[in-house]
Amino acid sequence: MKKILQYLFEHKTLTRQAAKELLLSMSAGAYNDSELASLMTVFLMRSITIAELQGFRDALLELAVPVNLGTHDLLDIVGTGGDGKNTFNISTLSCFIVAGAGQKVAKHGNYGASTISGSSNVMEQLGYVFKNDEAKLEQELDAANICFLHAPLFHPALKLVGPIRKNMGVRTFFNMLGPLVNPAKPAHQLIGVYSLEMARIYHYLLQEEGINYTIIHGLDGYDEISLTSDTKIFTAKGERIVSATSLGKRIVFPEDLVGGDTVEASAAIFLKIIKGEGTMAQNAVVLANAASALFATHKYATYEDAYAAAVDSLDSQKAYQVLQQLIALQ
């Protein structure tokens, strides 16, 4: 590792193959915690290259526990995290609204590394039991339209570096990898990123994949549609800027989106919103993200149709019923 670190400290970059081999060695336990922390710090001090990201992704997918959920028509809503905003669990809530609208969801998530409550934290608090048993996950998908894939159970490397990431408390290149390595390989993805630079890297990578993707970036630094500002949206057809009022019918304020200061508090906010008891601002944000995900599946003629489906899912408590059905299966 000393040789690799010295190479990187000289502002040199890795080839795709070298990056892949490095992550494979990391997963095999070849390096100690200090070496791994130093490596992650390198990519905080400079931007990761497309080749490096591709190589790290190649390694994670090669090592991943495979999962076949019996359908190719899956969707995931996932953010990179690392935007430092400490919002409530917008992406995860949006997944349940989407599932309530009839779209099957394979949500890929992890414990929060740079935030108090990641998707895995809140799902665990709500009573979900992590698993990588195909049959049980498929059962959940059939009964509730959603299952949850806890990343460390499918990606050994993520489990290995989890404690180091948590101790560092800042975003690392693993934040960038998470949305790219859902083991269920969903056909549709709504991906939130924390910077325009990252959005363009993802845009380049995903164009080559042939999947149906939509990348979103809140122009004031959010890795989701925040409605606090305009949103930059990237698809295979190009890029555009959309106003908060177009996406969510209103503008909200950053303080409206703040999550809990404990996992328990975050779960309480989650339950309040999914039961239809959220504030107008909270509801507007999860509906905008859910509607954008539904619209991205190309099953709705207009965004307004997708938004109406999201509203119906939340207001009629279909989303809450999905959560109840899922937890009842644990």
Image (cartoon, rainbow, N blue to C red):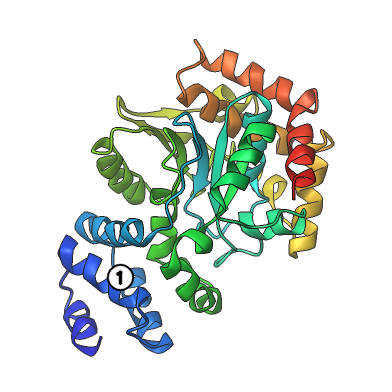
Would you place residue 286 above or below residue 297 in this image? below
| Residue at position x 34%, y 33% in the image | 211
Please indicate whether residue 257 sits to the left or right of residue 71 in the image. Answer: right
Residue marked by disc 1:
23
Looking at this view, name the residue that lies furthest to the front. Answer: 135
Question: Which is nearer the eye, 141 or 111?
Answer: 141
| Residue at position x 84%, y 36% in the image | 277
Would you place residue 287 above or below residue 111 in this image? above
Q: Residue 229 at x, y = what percent?
A: 54, 38
| Residue at position x 57%, y 53% in the image | 133
Residue 149 is at least partly visible in this image: yes
| Residue at position x 32%, y 72% in the image | 45
Would you place residue 309 above or below residue 48 in this image? above
Report helix, strand or loop for mark 1.
Answer: helix
Please indicate whether residue 84 sits to the left or right of residue 94 in the image. Answer: left
Question: Which is nearer the eye, 232 or 126?
Answer: 126
Please indicate whether residue 183 sits to the left or right of residue 252 in the image. Answer: left
- Specify the quadrant of the image occupied by residue 137: top right
Quadrant placement of the N terminus: bottom left
Residue 251 is at least partly visible in this image: no
Please indicate whether residue 214 sits to the left or right of residue 300 in the image. Answer: left
- Specify the quadrant of the image occupied by residue 236: top left
Q: Residue 225 at x, y = what percent?
A: 54, 38
Q: Amino acid at mark 1?
A: Leu
Q: Residue 237 at x, y = what percent?
A: 30, 24
Question: Which is nearer the eye, 283 or 112?
Answer: 112
